[in-house]
Amino acid sequence: MKGHIGFSYIGLLFLLLLFIPNLIWTRKLPQGYTSERESRILLFFERLGEILTCCCALLFSDFNLRPWTSRTWWLIAAFFLMIMYEFWWIRYFRSERSLSDFYSSLLGIPVAGATLPVLAFFLLGIYGRVIWMLLSAVFLGIGHIGIHLQHRKELNPA
């Protein structure tokens, strides 16, 4: 489960599916959005996870297509989650772009804009049997999902 070094076109595709809507988002921020008051610990995990996930996605050829095996279902599931992520973005861009829209759920998945890509990259790690991607996705999930949950909680204090 260590991974084979080499370019991954599947990893590049996943990163494009991740980055393109995020670039559009920088011009369509939710009303009232701020990154102030984010936990430094969660921010550290998020940044670490972002860097490691991007590097793993591109540098391990284990994510590329290969003959069908039962592991192929993990790749299909990962792609499905990325497609759901794109649908979440479409719904956000068509909305009023409020904070509650940005931290919304999709099909029962909480803070879907953060959760779906993290889960997709984790499943990609299972498919490729790359422990480094699994760890990267865990770090990313702790930080990214944690920050989104923190912001959502600020919107709806219990």
Image: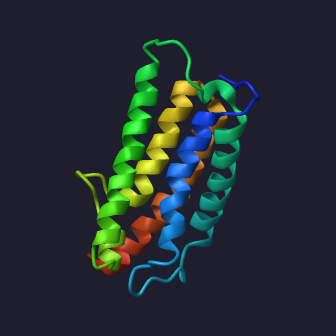
Q: Looking at this rendering, what residue extends furthest in the left direction?
A: 107
Q: Does any portion of residue 111 appear in the rendered image? A: no
Q: Seen in the image, is 94 located left or right of residue 3?
A: left
Q: Does any portion of residue 110 appear in the rendered image? A: yes
Point 66% across, 36% down: residue: 132
Give how far across and how far down residue 82 sits, in percent.
Answer: 42, 45
Q: Looking at this rendering, what residue extends furthest in the right direction?
A: 5
Give how far across and how far down residue 87 sits, in percent.
Answer: 32, 54
Q: Seen in the image, is 110 located left or right of residue 139?
A: left
The residue nearer to you, when weighing 22 against 118, is 22
Give how far across and how far down residue 113 sits, in percent.
Answer: 40, 59
Quadrant for residue 32, please give it: bottom left
Point 62% across, 35% down: residue: 9
Q: Quadrant of the N terminus?
A: top right
Point 63% across, 55% down: residue: 50
Give how far across and how far down residue 64 sits, in percent.
Answer: 60, 27
Point 33% across, 61% down: residue: 90
Q: Is residue 42 above or below residue 18?
A: below
The residue nearer to you, when weighing 117 against 91, is 91
How many labels sit on residues?
Answer: 0
Q: Quadrant of the C terminus?
A: bottom left
> Which colour style is shown?
rainbow
Q: Is residue 115 above or below residue 7?
A: below
Q: Is residue 126 above or below residue 42?
A: above
